Amino acid sequence: MKRTHGEGNRSHESYESHRSNRTNSTHRTNDPLPLIGSHGGYRRLKSYQTAEIVHDATVAFVARFIDRRSRTTDQMVQAARSGKQNIAEASQASATSKKTELKLTSVARASLEELLLDYEDFLRQHHLPLWPKDEPQALAIRKLAYASNRSYSTYKTYVERSSPQTAANTLICLIHQANYLLDRQLAQLERQFLAEGGFTERLYHTRRHHRDHP
């Protein structure tokens, strides 16, 4: 799909870096991987943090610009919520099912892509411009990703006190950032799955290890 905005901050996401330490130098090479792997901790994920901002901003956006009786209101809020919730559920599911973690993360990505289209439709139907990636306002929004303690409050003025054009384009910038982070997360999960397998493989290797090393 053609992207018209920046794809997020490449130095801004390290997918649960504690996972990469599972096989550090203190871990003996003949030890099995933990049966119950690292899981949870989704609030530390940049993808979750960004999706949470998107959800809060979408609730404020539809309250301002979409008829609350319209089906679009519910659809947009549900898509935003699905993005956030599925990232959290995927993180929890990672303890026992890499397959489920991958699936739920993919659902989150798909939900945010659906929401992205809703905002692009809003601009097109209201004859408002979609900011190009080098638009000064788009650059300003993207730089906010570096703000410390970033939350919805960081973007509140753009969503609640600006024009519909600015509000919609702000959300589009945020969704592109969230999607970029989720794409990286999915790629990392795929590599982990290929390297470590899922719960069934870990269970097999753990049982075999305990049998061979009583």
Image (spheres, rainbow, N blue to C red):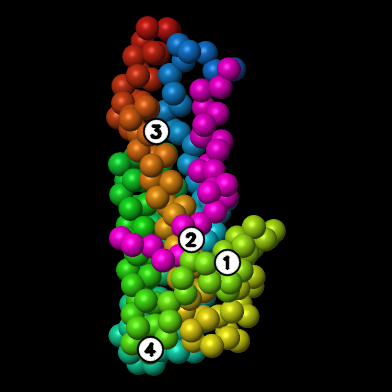
Residue that mark 2 sits on: 6
The quadrant the N terminus occupies is: bottom left
Marks 1/3: CA–CA distance: 33 Å
Whether tag 1 and tag 3 are in contact, CB under 8 A, the answer is no
Of residue 4 and residue 41, the one placed in the foreground of this image is 4
Front tag of 3 and 4: 4
Residue 4 spot, x, y in % from top left: 41, 66
Q: Residue at x 42, y 86 (%)?
A: 128
Whether tag 2 and tag 1 are in contact, CB under 8 A, the answer is yes
Residue that mark 3 sits on: 192
The circle drawn on residue 127 is 4
Mark 2 lies on a secondary structure that is loop
Decide if residue 86 is on the left or right side of residue 155: left
Marks 4/1: CA–CA distance: 22 Å
The span shown in magenta is: 1-25
Amino acid at pointer 4:
His
Whether tag 3 and tag 4 are in contact, CB under 8 A, the answer is no
- Residue 160 falls inside the magenta stretch: no
Amino acid at pointer 1:
Leu
Marks 2/3: CA–CA distance: 27 Å
In the image, residue 83 sits, relative to residue 117, either above or below, namely above
- The answer to whether residue 48 of the structure is visible from this angle is no
Callout 1: few (<14), some (14-19), or many (20+) C-alpha neighbours within 10 Å? some
Marks 3/4: CA–CA distance: 45 Å
Amino acid at pointer 3:
Gln
The circle drawn on residue 139 is 1
